Image (spheres, rainbow, N blue to C red):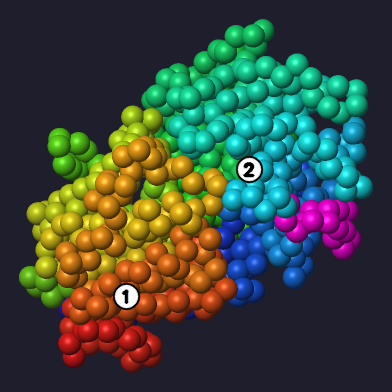
Amino acid sequence: MTEPNRPQAAPSGTWTSPISAAVVAAGAMPLSQLALDGRDVLWLAGRASEAGRTTLLRQRAGAMAELTPAPFNVRSRVHEYGGGAYAVDGGTVWFSHHADNKLYRVEDSAEPVQMTKEEAVRYADFVPDRARQRLVAVREDHLAGEAHPVNTVCAVGFDGTETILVDGNDFYAAPRLSPDGKQLAWLCWDHPRMPWQGTELWVADVADDGSLVDGRLVAGGMDESICQPEWSPEGLLHFVSDRSGWWNLYRFEHGVVHPLCPREAEFGGPHWSFGGSMYGFRSEDEIVCTYIEDGVSRLASLSTRGCTLTPIDTPYQEIRELRVTPQAVAVLAGSPTIALELALIDPATGAREVLARSIDALPDTGYLSVPRSIRYPSANGRSAYAFHYAPANKDFALPDGELPPLIVIGHGGPTGMATSTLKLATQFWTSRGFAVLDVNYGGSSGFGRSYRDLLKGQWGVIDVEDCVAGARHLAAEALADPERLLIRGSSAGGLTTLSALAFHDVFKAGASYYGVSDLAGLDADSHKFESHYNEYLIAPKAQADAVYRQRSPIHHTASLKRPMIFFQGLDDKVVPPQQSESMVEALRASRVPVAYITLEGEGHGFRKADSVVKTLEAELVFYLRVFGIPVPQGLPQVEIENLAA
C-alpha cells in the first residue's frame, strides 16, 4: 500500500499556494443589487479586468444577456457610496452611468438612450411611476457650487424633465410608491445624524398633477433608525425600526405602528448605500425575510397576521441581499465554504438554483480555511466578536513548536460587519501559513443598537481595544505567535490599524488601505454624507479639537515605531491621499520602516484587477521582509525605506 502524501513541514510564509494574487483578482466578481422583473432576474457584476466597470446582467428563460455593454458603468455616486443605480419595470431598465452621472434607459436589448443632461446632478434609488411616465428618485445637485450638494426627492420624466417633490432635509432615501400610485413614502434625516442613528419615515398623497400633498410623519426621530420602507401588495406600509434596540419589522395600519416579530435579531442594516433589501412580500399575508443573530444570517417566512416566523433551510451564513415576488425568491448569499453567489430559493423546500457566482472555480478545499466564530473578553469587562481562520494548506504544516503569524483585520465603516462568507483575499493569507482574525469590534452592525452605540465618542478606542484583545486572546490560546502579530485595515479600519500601532505595544507591523490618520483633516476634506459623522464617533465640535489631537495618529508618530505599509487610491474623495501622505512623511522623517503604494484611477476601494494584484503581493512581500522570511521568486520588489537589509 502506498502511504498518502503527508504535508511538508515548512515555516509560515514559505508555503506555496494555488491562491495567487492574480487568482484573487480574477476570481472575485463583485455581485450586487438584485432585481426581479416578472420571471426575469437582474443583477450587477463587477468586471475587474475592465478597470472595475460594473455591468447589468439579466437572466431570462435560462439565457443570460448583458444590458449595458462597455463603456457603460452602472454606478451611482450619490453620498459617494452610491447604490440603487438602476431600476427595472416591464422589461425597461433605467440606470445611472458612472462616467457622466446621467440617467439612461434601455428597452429590452436595445442600445441605452440618454435621458438627463447635467453631469453635476446625480441620481439613485429609482422607482418607476409608469402611470405618470416618470421615475421617482433621490437627487443630489452639485450645480450650485456650494460646499456641499443639495439633496432632494425628485421626479424625472421619461422625456428627461425634472420636478422636485420633496426638499428641505439634508438627506433622503428609499422613495417608495404605493401599489395604486396614490401615496409615496420616503426616509429623511439631517445633520449631524447618520441614518443608523436617527431617521424619519414620511408618507404623502400623490395629487393628480403628480405633486405631493398632506405629508405626515409615520415613525422615527432623533434616536430611532428606520430603514427599508415597503408597501404590501394591498397597500399597507411596512418598515424596519430599531426602536426596541434591534432592527425589527413593523406595519403601519390605521395610524398605528404594529410590531410584526419582536426578536433580538437584526432585520435591517446601516444605510451606507442605496437599494438594500432584507425582506419582501410573496403575498399580503407572507413576508420572506433574512435576519442576523449572533453574526449569522438566517432566511425565514413571516406570517404578517399571525406574526409567526418559520425558518427556511439554506446552506448560507450571510445573506447580503434578498428580493421577493409571488413567483420567486432571490438571494445574494454565501458561507465559509460558498463564495458569494446569486441563487433562486424555493421557500417550500429550500431547494436552490444558482444563477451566478462571484468565483467561478474554487480552489481545492484542502487549501481553504473554514473560520470559527469566537466571542472573547475585551477591555472593561466587555465581550467582542470575531471570525478566526487557522492556517490551512494540504501540502504544508508548521514545524513542531512554531506558531503562525496572525493578521488582525479591522473592518471599515466603522459600523460595518465582518462576515464568514468565503473570500479568496482571506484564503490568500491562510494558505501561506498565516492565521487571520476578522474582528467585529464594538460599534459593528449585526449585534443590536447597544453594541453599535459602543463606538459613540469612542472611535479609535473601543475598536482598537477589541483588536488588541483579540490578538492577545489567540496568543494566550497558543493559536498565534505573540512576536508576529500584524494588523491591517481599510478606511475606518485604517484608523484602527494606525491607532493600535501608535497607542499599544502588541502588533509588530501594519498595513493601512486608504486609512484615516488625521481626524481634523478628515472633517475638512469630508464629503457631505459624513461631514458630521465625527461628532458622533469622536466628540461634538466644541470639544473636538483636543480629542481629535489625542486620537489622531498623525500627532503621535513619535510613538509609531513599527513598520508600516500604506496603500492609497489617488482619486479617493472619501479619505483623500493627504491622509496617507502625511503619515508616510512623518514615519520617513522618524526613520521608521515605511512603504507607500499609490494607485492611479482608483478611489475609495480598489476595483481594478491589476490594483488587487499589486497591493496583495506588495503586502505579502512587506510582511516577509519585516519578519526576515525569504521572499519567493516571482514576487515584486517593494521599496521599504529605513528597513535594514
Amino acid type at circle 1 is Glu
Which of these two is toward me, 301 or 239? 239
Pointer 1 local density, CA inside 10 Å: few below 14, some 14–19, many at least 20: few
Number of the label disc, if any, that sits on residue 275: 2
Residue 627 image position (x, y, % from top left) = 18, 78
Q: Is residue 391 left or right of residue 245?
A: left
Q: Is residue 592 visible?
A: no
Residue 283 image position (x, y, % from top left) = 70, 24
Which of these two is toward me, 574 or 414? 574
Amino acid type at circle 2 is Gly
Which of these two is toward me, 463 or 460? 460
Range of residues picked out in magenta: 102-121
Q: Which residue is mark 1?
A: 585
Q: Which type of secondary structure does the marked residue at label 2 adopt?
A: loop
Magenta: main secondary structure = loop
Q: Is residue 495 left or right of residue 642?
A: right
Name the residue: 86% across, 53% down. Answer: 115
Name the residue: 40% across, 57% down. Answer: 521
Q: Which type of secondary structure does the marked residue at label 1 adopt?
A: helix
